[in-house]
């Protein structure tokens, strides 16, 4: 068993709206002793916002600056612009197809023109209607899987660019649990017959435990609170209809039985454990986003003395969890 080679890179989003020329942000990284960069679309290379001729010139500027500074682009990644939309799962397929054909595909083609360059992205979400209705959820899920399979096939055709989807931490942004992430990767591989991967972010396990299925005692406590205060306490009940059931006088057992039909809206304890994600899916995450967190939110804090004091992300633990992942037997259903 051979361990992977690990390179430390820095996302160039720190340069957004400030040092926008490739030579500028590459010189800054070189001065810090960093030789690999993650190129964010937000730093003036977005496929939807930028002019096509400009983007061709931008590639030339990157190569010239790379030769001068020794900094290489390790991978391209989507930024805030695409993250703020429903993107690949927009209910109007015209918008979803535009995101696929005019953003994802051109970015893959761009990545293929750089040596050993990967690509990652997250540009979708499920609207509330999908969370409240199982059939609607399946419809949106099917559309996402179909487009991800097409992305995997296009990446394979583009010089086999290693491509992955970022994992998130709330039900409307799948994959957000270990099980759903593994199933997504397996399904995309099966449909496309091409490799497809994941990006694990070490701060994206901060919310899953807030979305655990409520137990019978917890539901009974919520009912008692409702009767006393005239409103529900802060408790995740999944679909909105569960709230309405409690307000209409349903008992805890009836609500619990109803929630059994919405497994995609609930997480397990392990889903809130960064090291468990790394042990289970680290070998299928060629890009790992590192951030410090106190486990309460994904604030992208630095690894400095102040934030490390209450931080839960520690380098040795990350490496140890990855090593354990690579020591596990290979799963033939995975890439």
Image: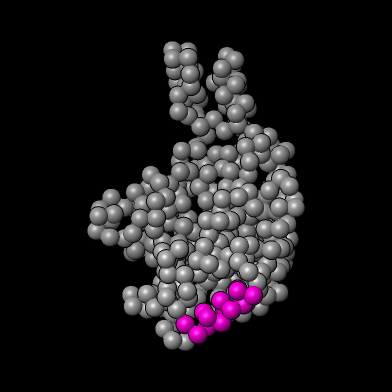
Provide the residue span drawn in magenta: 53-66
Q: Is residue 210 above or below residue 32?
A: above
Quadrant containing the C terminus is: bottom right
Q: Is residue 30 above or below residue 51?
A: below
Magenta run includes residue 56: yes
Left or right, residue 265 beside residue 71: right
Q: 237 or 255: which is nearer to us?
A: 237
Residue shown at the point (63%, 69%) measured from the top left:
51
Left or right, residue 13 beside residue 113: left
Q: Can you tell which quarter of the image residue 46 is in? A: bottom right
Whether residue 334 appears in this view of the structure is no
Residue shown at the point (59%, 71%) measured from the top left:
162
Magenta run includes residue 308: no
The percent coordinates of residue 299 (x first, y second) are 39, 51
Whether residue 79 appears in this view of the structure is yes
Residue shown at the point (69%, 60%) measured from the top left:
100
Q: How is the image coloured?
A: one colour
The percent coordinates of residue 125 (x first, y second) are 61, 47
Q: Is residue 161 above or below residue 261?
A: below
Q: 254 or 139: which is nearer to us?
A: 139
The dominant secondary structure in magenta is helix
Q: Can you tell which quarter of the image residue 207 is in? A: top left
């Amino acid at each position: 068993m051979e361990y992977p080679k690990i390179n430390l890179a820095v996302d160039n989003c720190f340069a957004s709206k400030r040092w926008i020329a490739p030579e500028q942000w590459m010189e800054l990284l070189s001065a810090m002793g960093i030789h690999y960069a993650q190129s964010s679309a937000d730093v003036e290379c977005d496929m939807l916002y930028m002019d096509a001729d400009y983007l061709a010139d931008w590639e030339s500027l990157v190569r010239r600056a790379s030769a001068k500074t020794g900094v290489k682009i390790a991978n391209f990644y989507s930024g805030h612009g695409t993250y703020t939309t429903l993107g690949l799962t927009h209910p109007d397929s015209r918008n979803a197809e535009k995101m696929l054909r005019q953003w994802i595909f051109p970015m893959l083609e761009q990545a293929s023109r750089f040596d050993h360059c990967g690509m990652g992205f997250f540009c979708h979400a499920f609207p509330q209607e999908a969370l409240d209705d199982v059939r609607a959820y399946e419809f949106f899920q099917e559309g996402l899987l179909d487009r991800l399979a097409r992305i995997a096939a296009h990446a394979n055709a583009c010089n086999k660019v290693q491509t992955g989807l970022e994992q998130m931490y709330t039900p409307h942004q799948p994959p957000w649990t270990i099980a759903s992430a593994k199933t997504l990767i397996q399904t995309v591989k099966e449909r496309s017959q091409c490799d497809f991967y994941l990006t694990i972010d070490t701060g994206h396990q901060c919310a899953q435990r807030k979305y655990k299925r409520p137990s019978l005692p917890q539901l009974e406590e919520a009912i008692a609170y409702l009767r006393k205060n005239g409103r529900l306490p802060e408790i995740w009940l999944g679909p909105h209809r569960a709230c309405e059931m409690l307000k209409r006088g349903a008992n805890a057992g009836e609500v619990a039985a109803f929630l059994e039909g919405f497994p995609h809206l609930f997480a397990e304890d392990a889903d809130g454990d960064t090291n468990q994600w790394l042990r289970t899916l680290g070998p299928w995450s060629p890009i790992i986003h590192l951030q410090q967190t106190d486990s309460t939110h994904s604030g992208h804090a630095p690894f400095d003395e102040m934030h490390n004091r209450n931080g839960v992300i520690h380098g040795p633990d990350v490496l140890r969890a990855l090593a354990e992942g690579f020591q596990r037997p290979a799963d033939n259903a995975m890439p």
